[in-house]
Amino acid sequence: MNALKSGALMALMTGLFLAVGWWLGGNVGMVVALVMAAVMNFVSYWYSDKIALGMYRAKEVDRSSAPKLYDAVARLSERAGLPTPKVYVIQSDTPNAFATGRNPRNAAVAVTTGVLRALDDRELEGVIAHELSHVKNRDILVQTVSATFAGAVTMIAHMASWAMMFGGFGGSDDDEGGGLIGGLLMIIVAPIAATVVQLAISRSREYMADESGAKISGDPRALASALEKLQLHNQRRPIRGAEPATAHMFVVNPLSGGGVSKLFSTHPPIEERVKRLRAMA
């Protein structure tokens, strides 16, 4: 069900993107939007892993430098039917983790030093299994594409707003495209809609990763316990330098915030995730 929901949301995101291009520039605008999406997705597909790991100064480790962590990743990868990804460690006291890479053969799992201190062996395996599930389910690619589309929609809307300020969209509503009123609506509504769809995709994939990760580790309660610990630590002290653009990659939201900001969180509520995991047990 979550896979079907993600597919429908991706189709909606693509339709929204094309609609913005057409509404703001007719057929030409739609072609320009497609070209922009192609270029941005090419860069994201090939380089998003290097960019993300570089942003957090992650250092690659092996069996000799981090035996417990590396062996856990290798063992769970074999159980999941995946090649062992590269393993990285981020120097941060805040416990968290993420996976990146364009496919299972070019994947990486990164954990903070805080994770290794805050979690016991069972909880650590639960978190690693969750991240391996993202790799197995191709979530990294899906989320990268959705984030790229959302960013491109916002970029087009900003460009359109500047064009209107300097005389663009001066034709009548009978012209090809959406005209002045349609342009104004798209500039305001489209970025919000794209963000909402992106967040819905991210949340859906998190539920999938929790479920399949619990099956890989064979211990849903351990993952539930780990999520509660990670949530508490990240609320008290978010990861220093965490960026909204990469927040969706982490096992729990690395950014602080409550109230209205929760509506725009890339992650579903921890309480609901824990509830589903304990129901599995």
Image (cartoon, grey):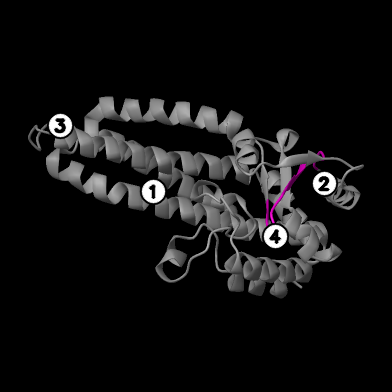
Give the distance between the C-alpha atoms of the residues marked 1 and 4, in whole angstroms.
Answer: 30 Å
The amino acid beneath tag 4 is Pro
User: Where does the magenta region start and end?
Assistant: 82-97
Task: Report the residue marked by disc 1.
Answer: 194
The amino acid beneath tag 2 is Ser
Give the distance between the C-alpha atoms of the residues marked 2 and 1, in whole angstroms.
Answer: 34 Å
Which callout, 3 or 4, points at the residue further toward the start of the chain? 4
Q: Secondary structure at mark 4?
A: loop
Task: Report the residue marked by disc 4.
Answer: 95
Say above or below: 262 vs 13: below
Q: Position of residue 131 (x, y in %)?
A: 71, 51
Q: Position of residue 236 (x, y in %)?
A: 60, 69
Give the distance between the C-alpha atoms of the residues marked 2 and 4, in whole angstroms.
Answer: 21 Å
Task: Report the residue marked by disc 3.
Answer: 168
The amino acid beneath tag 1 is Ala
Give the distance between the C-alpha atoms of the residues marked 3 and 4, in whole angstroms.
Answer: 49 Å
Q: Is residue 20 left or right of residue 101?
A: left
